[in-house]
Image (cartoon, helix red, strand yellow):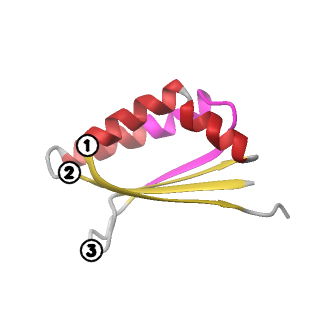
Amino acid sequence: MVVHIVMFRFKEAQKEANIRRAKEMLEALPEKIEPLRSMEVGVDFLHSERSMDLVLTSTFDDREGLEAYRIHPAHQEVVAFLKETTEKSVVVDYEKERR
């Protein structure tokens, strides 16, 4: 199993509205992208200096599934929105053994 985690810090302009919209867009992806096995989207409530605003955790059967997700047009639409509205993102992709 492949786990894909991305955290985003949004620009101040229309920040709350953009976070809500990004969450909605991301949560719609599992119905559109077959290799996407699970997705959880969380919004930060602490707002500390170290906080990011939104986190995405998704899983795939394998690296090929992650790549299919990456290039899927529905995902690319979300990526375009996030590039316009965020100032920073960080990502971790790793393989997790099935139990």
Front-most of 96 and 23? 96
Does the CB distance between marks 3 and 2 fall below 8 Å? no
Does 40 appear in magenta?
yes
Q: Amino acid at mark 1?
A: Thr
Disc 1 crowd, CA 10 A, few/some/many (<14, 14-19, 20+):
many
* Residue extent of the magenta highlight: 25-42
Residue 51 located left or right of residue 79: left
Q: Amino acid at mark 2?
A: Lys
Quarter containing the N terminus? bottom right
Quarter containing the C terminus? bottom right
Q: Is residue 3 above or below residue 60?
A: below
Q: Residue at x 31, y 74 (%)?
A: 50
Does the CB distance between marks 3 and 1 fall below 8 Å? no
Does the CB distance between marks 1 and 2 fall below 8 Å? yes
Give the quadrant of residue 36.
top right
For marks 1 and 2 on the same chain, the one whose residue lies earlier in the sequence: 2
Residue 93 at x, y percent in the picture: 59, 58
Residue 89 at x, y percent in the picture: 37, 56
Secondary structure under the numbered disc 3 in the rendered image: loop
* Residue with the mark numbered 2: 11
Front-most of 64 and 11? 64
* Residue with the mark numbered 1: 85
* Residue with the mark numbered 3: 48
Disc 3 crowd, CA 10 A, few/some/many (<14, 14-19, 20+):
few
Q: Is residue 3 above or below residue 36?
A: below
Residue 2 at x, y percent in the picture: 69, 54
Disc 3 to disc 2, C-alpha distance: 15 Å
Disc 3 to disc 1, C-alpha distance: 20 Å
Q: Residue at x 26, y 39 (%)?
A: 84
